[in-house]
C-alpha cells in the first residue's frame, strides 16, 4: 500500500467538505479549490495505477512523482484544515483528541479575516504546484505505467518451483502423502467418484507450489487428462483457460483460434466430460476469477480431482477440503539448510558453525524459500562473513539471484494489500 494513496485518501474528503460545507469561499478561492479537487482526483486515479505495479517494476520517474504527490497532498491537507479551523473551528471526526493540540496552536495565529487572506494565498501557491505535478505526470507518461508493465516479459520466479529436483526437497513426503490420502478418501464408491477440489493454503514462501507439484507428479499417471497452471496475481482469464485447454488437449489446441471466455469454458467442459482429470490451479488471488475458472470443471462422476494453491483464505474456503501448510520444523529446517549448502559452490567447511547457523535458521522461521535463499547466499561466502550476513538479514543485498527472487515472491503478499481511501 503506497503512502501517497493514503495521503490522497485523507485529503479528498476534506476538499469536498471545503467546497460543499458552510465556509463562504470567495469566488476566486472557490474556483481555485474546485480546480484543486478536480486535479487531485485525477492524480489520485493515476496514483492507484502506480500502486498496482510492484515497486521493483517502477521506473525512477514514477517513484519520484508518487513521492512528490504524497508531500503535496499532506501540504494541501494542512492548508485546508487551517482554513476550516480558523473560520469555523472545524475538527475532523476521527482522532479528535490528537487534533485538539493542533487546533489550539492554529487558533492563536489567525483571526477569521486574516485566515481567509492567508489561506487564499496558500491555495494559489499550491495551485501552481499541482499544475507542475500534472505536467510531470504527462512528461513521465505515468498513465502508461500499467501498459508498459503488461508489455514487458516478466518471468515469475515461482515457476522454478514446478521444476525442482525431487532430491532437493526436504519435508515434502509427509504432506504430499497426506494430500494424496485426502484426495482418495470417500465414504463410499459414489462419493469417491465425485469431483473433489482440495486447496493448499498458506503464506508466501512456504512451498505451496512445490507441494502441489509433488502431488501432481505422483498422481498424474492415474488420470486421462491433466494440467498444471500458474495463475499469479494479475492474470488474463482467457490466457488461463487457454493454458489449461492446451495441456488437456494439445492436438485440438494447436489448431484452435483465440476464443472468448464463454466459449473457452464451454470447450473445456466438452473436453472434460466423461473424462477422469487432474488439474492444479496454482496461486489464485481472486475469488471472482476462481468462480469463473471453476465453471469449466464439469463433474461427470469419474473421480476427477482439482488442486488449488492460494494465500487468500476466502479462495481456500471455496474448496471441498483445505490443507493448511505449515512452516518446517527446526530439524527439517536444518536438514534443508545443510542440503542447500552442500549443492552450492561452497567455500565453507563441511560442518558450518553451529551457533551462527542456528541464529540464521531462527530468523528464517521455518520458511523453505527463506532457508533456500540464505543458504544459497552463504554457500558462496567464506564462513568468516556469515556473522555479517546474519546481521544484515532482511534480504537487502541482492547480489544473489535467489535473494532477488525471494524478495519478489514475498512482496506479492504486500502488493495485494487493499487500497483504503
Image: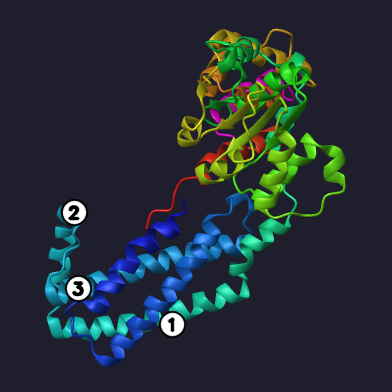
The percent coordinates of residue 410 (x first, y second) are 57, 36
Q: Are marks 1 and 3 in contact (CB under 8 Å)?
A: no
In the picture provided, is 313 more to the left or to the right than 205? left
Badge number at residue 84: 3
Q: Quadrant of residue 328?
A: top right
Label 2 to label 1: alpha-carbon separation = 31 Å
**Is 63 a magenta residue?**
no
Return the x and y of residue 292 as percentages of the image width and height.
58, 45
In front here: 353 or 98? 98
Disc ID at residue 128: 1
Circle 2 crowding by C-alpha within 10 Å: few under 14, some 14–19, many from 20: few
> Vertical placement of 312 versus 57: above or below?
above
Q: Is residue 4 left or right of residue 177?
A: left
The answer to whether 240 appears left or right of 134 in the picture is: right
Quick check: 319 above or below 396? above
Q: Quadrant of residue 212?
A: top right
Q: Residues within 10 Å of mark 3 (few under 14, many from 20)?
A: many
Tag 1, which secondary structure? helix
Residue 90 screen position, x and y as percent: 15, 69
Q: Residue 284: x, y in percent?
A: 58, 38
Region in magenta: 378-395
41 to the left or right of 382: left
Q: Which of disc 3 and disc 1 is earlier in sequence?
A: 3
Res 156 visible: no
Quadrant for the C terminus in the image: bottom left
Q: Would you name the residue on which mark 2 appears?
A: 98
Residue at 47% of width from left, 70% of height from top? 43
Q: Nearer the viewer, mark 1 or mark 3?
A: 3
Amino acid at each position: 500500500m503506497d503512502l501517497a494513496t493514503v495521503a490522497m485518501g485523507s485529503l479528498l474528503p476534506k476538499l469536498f467538505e471545503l467546497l460543499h460545507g458552510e465556509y463562504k469561499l470567495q469566488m476566486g478561492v472557490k474556483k481555485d479549490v474546485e480546480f484543486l479537487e478536480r486535479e487531485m482526483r485525477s492524480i489520485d486515479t493515476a496514483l492507484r495505477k502506480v500502486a498496482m505495479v510492484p515497486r521493483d517494476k517502477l521506473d525512477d520517474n514514477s517513484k519520484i512523482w508518487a513521492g512528490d504527490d504524497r508531500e503535496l497532498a499532506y501540504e494541501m491537507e494542512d492548508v485546508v484544515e487551517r482554513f476550516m479551523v480558523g473560520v469555523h473551528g472545524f475538527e475532523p471526526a476521527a482522532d479528535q483528541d490528537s487534533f485538539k493540540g493542533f487546533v489550539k496552536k492554529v487558533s492563536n495565529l489567525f483571526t477569521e479575516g486574516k485566515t481567509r487572506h492567508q489561506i487564499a494565498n496558500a491555495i494559489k501557491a499550491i495551485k501552481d504546484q499541482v499544475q507542475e505535478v500534472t505536467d510531470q505526470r504527462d512528461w513521465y507518461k505515468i498513465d502508461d505505467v500499467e501498459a508498459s508493465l503488461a508489455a514487458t516479459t516478466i518471468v515469475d520466479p515461482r515457476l522454478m518451483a514446478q521444476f525442482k529436483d525431487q532430491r532437493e526437497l526436504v519435508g515434502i513426503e509427509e504432506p504430499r502423502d497426506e494430500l494424496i490420502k485426502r484426495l482418495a478418501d470417500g465414504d463410499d464408491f459414489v462419493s469417491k467418484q465425485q469431483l473433489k477440489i482440495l486447496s493448499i493454503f498458506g503464506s508466501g514462501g512456504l512451498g505451496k507450489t512445490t507441494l502441489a507439484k509433488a502431488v501432481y507428479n505422483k498422481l498424474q499417471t492415474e488420470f486421462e487428462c491433466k494440467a498444471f497452471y500458474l495463475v499469479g496475481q494479475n492474470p488474463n482469464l482467457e490466457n488461463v483457460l487457454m493454458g489449461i485447454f492446451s495441456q488437456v488437449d494439445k492436438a485440438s489446441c494447436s489448431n484452435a483460434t483465440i476464443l472468448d471466455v464463454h466459449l473457452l469454458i464451454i470447450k473445456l467442459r466438452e473436453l472434460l466430460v466423461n473424462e477422469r482429470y487432474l488439474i492444479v490451479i496454482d496461486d489464485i488471488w481472486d475469488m471472482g476469477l476462481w468462480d469463473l475458472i471453476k465453471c469449466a470443471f464439469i463433474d461427470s462422476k469419474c473421480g476427477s480431482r482439482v488442486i488449488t494453491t492460494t494465500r487468500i483464505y476466502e479462495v481456500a474456503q471455496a474448496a471441498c477440503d483445505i490443507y493448511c501448510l505449515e512452516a518446517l520444523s527446526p530439524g527439517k529446517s536444518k536438514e534443508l539448510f545443510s542440503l542447500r549448502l552442500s549443492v552450492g559452490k561452497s567455500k565453507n567447511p563441511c560442518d558450518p558453525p553451529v551457533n551462527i547457523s542456528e541464529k540464521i535458521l531462527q530468523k528464517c522461521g521455518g520458511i523453505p524459500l527463506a532457508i533456500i535463499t540464505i543458504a544459497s547466499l552463504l554457500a558462496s561466502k567464506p564462513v568468516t562473513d556469515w556473522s555479517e550476513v546474519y546481521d544484515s538479514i532482511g534480504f537487502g543485498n541482492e547480489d544473489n539471484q535467489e535473494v532477488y527472487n525471494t524478495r519478489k515472491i514475498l512482496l506479492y503478499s504486500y502488493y495485494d494489500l487493499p487500497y483504503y481511501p
